[in-house]
Image (cartoon, rainbow, N blue to C red):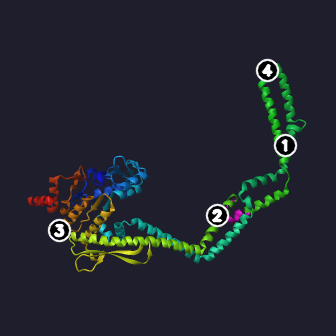
Amino acid sequence: MLAHLSIRNYLLVESVELDFAPGLTVLTGETGAGKSILVDALALALGDRAEGGVVRSGAPRAEIAAGFVVEGLPQLASWLEEAGFAVDDGSLILRRVIEAGGRSRAFINGSAAPLTQLKEAAEFLLDIHGQHAHHALLRPQTQREVLDAYAGAQQTAATVSTAWHAWQGARQRRLDAESHGQARQIEREGLQLAVEELRALGDDLARWDDIQTEHARLSHVTTLIEGSQALIDGLDEGEAAVSSQLGDMSARLDAMQAVDDSLKEVATLLHSASADLAEAVHALRRYSDSLNLDPERLNELDALLSDMHRLARKHRVQPDALASLLERFRTRLAELAASDDLDTLQASEEVTLAHYQHAANQLSALRRKAATALSKQVTAAMHELALAGGQLDIQLQPASEPRAHGLEDVSFLVASHTGLAPGSLAKVASGGELSRISLAIQTALSGVAGVPTLIFDEVDVGIGGSVAEAVGRRLAKLGETRQVLVITHLPQVAARGTQHLRVAKQANGGFVSSNIELLDAAARVEELARMLGGIKITATTRQHAAEMLAG
């Protein structure tokens, strides 16, 4: 449940620290005092989009932190473990910092986190029902989502949607193969010709660097042979060969060393040079022996390089990319062969259709069962909310064709009084009636949602009198099993709270602030009296407020 909320420099709030209790908490205040600020700030802590304009004037940043007690929520515990967020004391803190420039940062238990993770965590913690949530109920999509949520069928609905898209993809591939067969045949013939030309080069296709090296050597073999022999002559075989001169010098140095032993190191170096020279001459002779004039091989390489350059120009690639190009062509040919296999494509389409139908039939069964139960539960709640004789009828009409959302369209039909034929919510229900029906549905959903905290932001708008009392009783009953926070302008609802918060505006040094405070018993009487009597509060009004709290 929500245990603590800290708000700093957010809109009109300079600094607020709130502790929350189990049960029903009500939040009241005069019009324009900023009652919805608390819910809006909490929504930011749970991952809603932020803008720099929410930062209090003159402050560098706004900061909202929401603390939750998360014991007894195994699914959330698993999610936190997988996401790498440690929870040691059974508490979870979601924190959001919004800079005045609009940049924001998010944290889970002190560790930086993307907004997507805040939103995912929030799904385990609470539901926020905004003051205009009942308007969304007029949309067929919302009605379908409500039924699926009540049925616990969201995952099945997601599977149906995925299966439908897979089936449509398989169907489109089959249709493409049928309608574009000629174009594919032309492409295939062109690829086959290109593959044959490239394959004719054999293994040489991937030896571009080696072939260039071999061609350069054969093209200059005469120069290489002559140069090698000239080097051998100069180093070892000529009249003034370096090896002979080095030998004479070595002999003279040996004689000098016999007289002066300090020349030993020089003599050693000269002997080493003589050995290195002999090794170099030996290597040159081996290299020279390996050089042969091979005009036939040179002609082969000329032709091969010419073919490779020609194909590279034709396909607009570098010669060293021809080998990978051949693999791409082969892969595309395989794809074309598969896409032109109408039998295989037809079989794939049938398999994906069967998978869709299986999942959609499961979803239909869940919806039929849930439609009956939800209709009864909401109808009973409508009677409690001063809609005696009214009823909700959830109809499942077969869709004209299979859809991503399933095999049927979902319609919520309502009769607000006995004897009236059920009709669409948009045409039958008034604003106040729609608000009460929405509350009945939301509380029905809360019984299966599993989240520990529910927040209602003025969902009681447009009602009063005995209806307001009925709404208050229903919210209080819901607070017996869930933590419920209600922003309300109705004293009948506020009187049912186990905890009462009040929002008030105050001016300080030219700045206007919204302050949220927890009311004690006496302050609650005054607040309810204000809600009942307006500006002038009499003893009678206070007595009435006290009686409401006592009742």
Real-space CA distance between mark 2 and mark 4, rounded to the nearest whole angstrom: 73 Å
Q: Position of residue 128 (x, y in %)?
A: 31, 61
Q: In the rendered view of the protein, which quadrant contains the N terminus?
A: bottom left
Disc 4 marks which residue? 261
CB atoms of marks 2 and 4 within 8 Å: no
How would you rate the neighbour count of disc 2 (Cα within 10 Å): few for under 14, some for 14-19, many for 20 or more? some
Q: Is residue 231 left or right of residue 50?
A: right
* Residue at (53% x, 72% y) in the render: 170
Q: Is residue 252 left or right of residue 187?
A: right
Q: Position of residue 377 (x, y in %)?
A: 27, 69
Q: Position of residue 298 (x, y in %)?
A: 82, 57
Disc 1 marks which residue? 285
CB atoms of marks 1 and 3 within 8 Å: no
As helix, strand or loop, the secondary structure at mark 2 comes to helix
**Dot placed on the residue nearer the N-terminal end, 4 or 1:** 4
Amino acid, disc 3? Ser
The quarter of the displayed image where residue 458 is located: bottom left
- Tell me where the magenta segment starts and ends, as one range: 310-318
Amino acid, disc 4? Asp
